[in-house]
Image: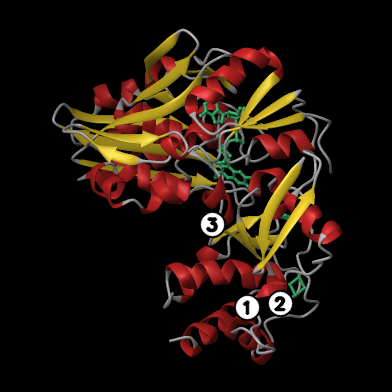
Amino acid sequence: MQIKVKVNGKEHISDVTPMQSLAAYLREELQLTGTHIGCDTSSCGSCTIIVNGKAVKSCTLLAAQVDGDEITTIEGLAQNGEMHPLQSAFKENHGLQCGFCTPGMIMTAVNLLEDNPKPSEEEIRHGLEGNFCRCTGYHNIVKSIQHAADSMK
Amino acid sequence: MIPAKFEYIKASSVSEALDLLAKHGDDAQLLAGGHSLVPAMKLRLNQPGAVIDIGKIEELKNISEDDNHLVIGAGCTHEQVATSSLVKENAKALAQAASSIGDLQVRNMGTIGGSLAHADPAADYPAVILATGAKIVVEGSSGKRAIDAADFFQGIFTTALEGNEMITEVHVPKAENGVYLKFSQPASRFAVVGCAAIKNANGVSVGLTGVTDTAYRASAVEEAYNGDSKAASEHAVDGVEVMGDHFASAEYRSHLAKVFTERALNALT
Ligand SMILES: Cc1cc2nc3c(=O)[nH]c(=O)nc-3n(C[C@H](O)[C@H](O)[C@H](O)COP(=O)(O)OP(=O)(O)OC[C@H]3O[C@@H](n4cnc5c(N)ncnc54)[C@H](O)[C@@H]3O)c2cc1C
Ligand code: FES
Ligand code: FES
């Protein structure tokens, strides 16, 4: 079956099978490997992307479901070679160690700051409930998002 | 993990979805947010031959009100229910239950209709749906009917829905006050125990989820309640066969049910 999607501003018309997950489609068809697959069971959040403005776990969507939709992945955040404020903040605040969870953390934070541009620490921690990090202990991730929120004001 | 082979069909209206359901019969499953169905299909616990995607049907995505009720479309996401000002003002417990589901990404996809149809014994909405005395409106090839919450949930993953029927709306009576409190399973955030308490002109009503194979109305608590939350909460599991599993033994679950019932009743006053 055919789907038409706009990914990071660019339109794609692709043949997919009904069984293909959106995460697999992005990684394997579009070579957008910044979207990571950790658990493949909707638990870890590393596959989080933005579909029509909302953070979702792309391992638990079928590619077929997003026909006609607008998608942003981690690769679409930087503009004209300039990192997105969340990306810079993660870099400056040591918000990552191995970096596996980072694309998902940042895409979730994009939705979080969209809904609530000045979140408290508690609101950030609540907003990240669907994202696991095995390295950092979350502390610097929260700090990075706080810094990004300040710099985006 | 890749699901077993199936045919994917997108429905653009309720009538089209009903026609497709009638045509494909028991071999078909509706897909709303897909956040119960897709994981089950990936684990091959569920292998429908055809999947009818109702996730883009706009007529299922509205929240409105009449004098006494909220009318919530089956396709409203948990996030939509959690953040709707109509819901927060008129059915506070429902907004609290919605905002406690899973995580932000799950709430952005999962729908109220999907959750009710799935009838997971640890799902959050059923406690509130029972306590408010909501009606679940379903449509099928033989027409439309409204099912009382009390008749809808029949057991583990089992409801009063017929194979050719779909949920289109949920009618939730407005309440003066309400609260939903839960003890979350720490990884999935499903309810180990969840309690909804609703206050309206006729008194207080209580719904519990997570305790046994299906959510139930705690009538013994309602009858015993005369302002003393602690005494009434002692009846939270009267006549109920309490589940035990590796998250919580039956004894611990019974204790949690009483504690959360007491807290919910206290929060109403
Ligand atoms: C990581 C994770 C954590 C979660 N945590 C919680 C939690 O804390 N609390 C909780 O309550 N839930 C939780 N859930 C479940 C979540 O709420 C699901 O979204 C919900 O149970 C199903 O809704 P859906 O729209 O995704 O349905 P789908 O997965 O699309 O469908 C589920 C079932 O319902 C049927 N169906 C769907 N829509 C209709 C309809 N309109 N009429 C008739 N049948 C229909 C489908 O055919 C299918 O059998 C969690 C899920 C995940 C993945
Ligand atoms: S890979 Fe999607 S949530 Fe873990
Ligand atoms: S930085 Fe390694 S998992 Fe988060």
**Left or right, residue A13 beside residue B132:** right
Structural distance between the alpha carbons of marks 3 and 2: 21 Å
Q: Are marks 1 and 2 on the same chain?
A: yes
Quadrant in the picture for the N terminus of chain B:
top right
> Relative to the observer, which residue lies in front, B254 or B100?
B100
Q: Quadrant of residue B221?
A: top left
Q: Residue at x 70, y 58 (%)?
A: A44
Q: Nearer the viewer, mark 1 or mark 2?
A: 1
Quarter, ligand 1 = top right
Q: Is mark 3 within 8 Å of ligand 1?
A: no
Q: Are the two marked residues, 1 and 2, in contact with CB atoms closer than 8 angstroms?
A: yes
Say what amino acid the circle numbered 3 marks: Leu
Q: Which mark is residue B104?
A: 3
Viewer-side residue, B176 vs B163: B163
**Looking at the picture, how far across and down is residue B144, in whole percent?**
40, 14
What is the chain letter for disc 3? B
Question: Which residue occupies 54% across, 20% down?
Answer: B18
On whether ligand 3 comes within 8 Å of the CB at mark 2, the answer is yes
Give the label on residue A141, or none.
1
| Residue type, numbered disc 1 | Ile
Whether callout 3 and callout 2 share a subunit is answered: no
| Amino acid under disc 2 | Thr
